[in-house]
Amino acid sequence: AEKQIEMYSRQGFSELPICMAKTQYSFSHNAALKGAPDGFVLPIRDVRASIGAGFIYPLVGTMSTMPGLPTRPCFFDIDIDPVTGQIRGLS
C-alpha cells in the first residue's frame, strides 16, 4: 500500500485527499467489531486512485467496488426500432 501511494505521489497526485473504503458496520476493517473498537491494526489490501473524481482510496478488508460510470449514460444510445420491434444499441 505504501508503494502504491508513493507511485501516485511520483505521478503528481500527492495533494489528492485519501478517502477510506471500508465496511460501513465498524470503524475497523471487521464488520464483527461493532461500534468504535480499539486495539486493532487496519490492514490495507490495495490502494487505488480516482483521478477524475480527485481522490485516492485505500481498500480495507474484503469488499467490492463499483466501476466508474461514463459522463454520458449508455442508455441514451439504446432504442427500439418502431418497425421491427428490435432493440438497437446493445452490443
Image (cartoon, helix red, strand yellow):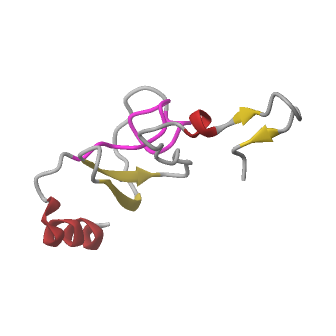
Q: Which quadrant of the figure has residue 79?
A: top right
Image quadrant containing the N terminus: bottom left
For image coordinates 10% across by 53% down, the residue present is 15
The mark tally for this picture is 0
Counting from the top left corner in percent of width and height, residue 56 is at 28, 52
Q: Main secondary structure of the magenta part?
A: loop
Q: Which quadrant of the figure has residue 22?
A: top left
Is 83 colored magenta in this rendering? no
For image coordinates 80% across by 38% down, the residue present is 87
Counting from the top left corner in percent of width and height, residue 36 is at 37, 29
Counting from the top left corner in percent of width and height, residue 39 is at 34, 45
Counting from the top left corner in percent of width and height, residue 20 is at 33, 43
Nearer to me, 11 or 26: 11
Q: Is residue 63 left or right of residue 35?
A: right
Q: Give the magenta-colored segment's residue range.
A: 18-33
Nearer to me, 44 or 49: 49
Nearer to me, 77 or 27: 77
Q: Is residue 24 left or right of residue 3?
A: right
Q: Is residue 88 above or below residue 9?
A: above
Task: Give the residue furthest to the right.
Answer: 84
For image coordinates 35% across by 60% down, the residue present is 47
Is 27 colored magenta in this rendering? yes
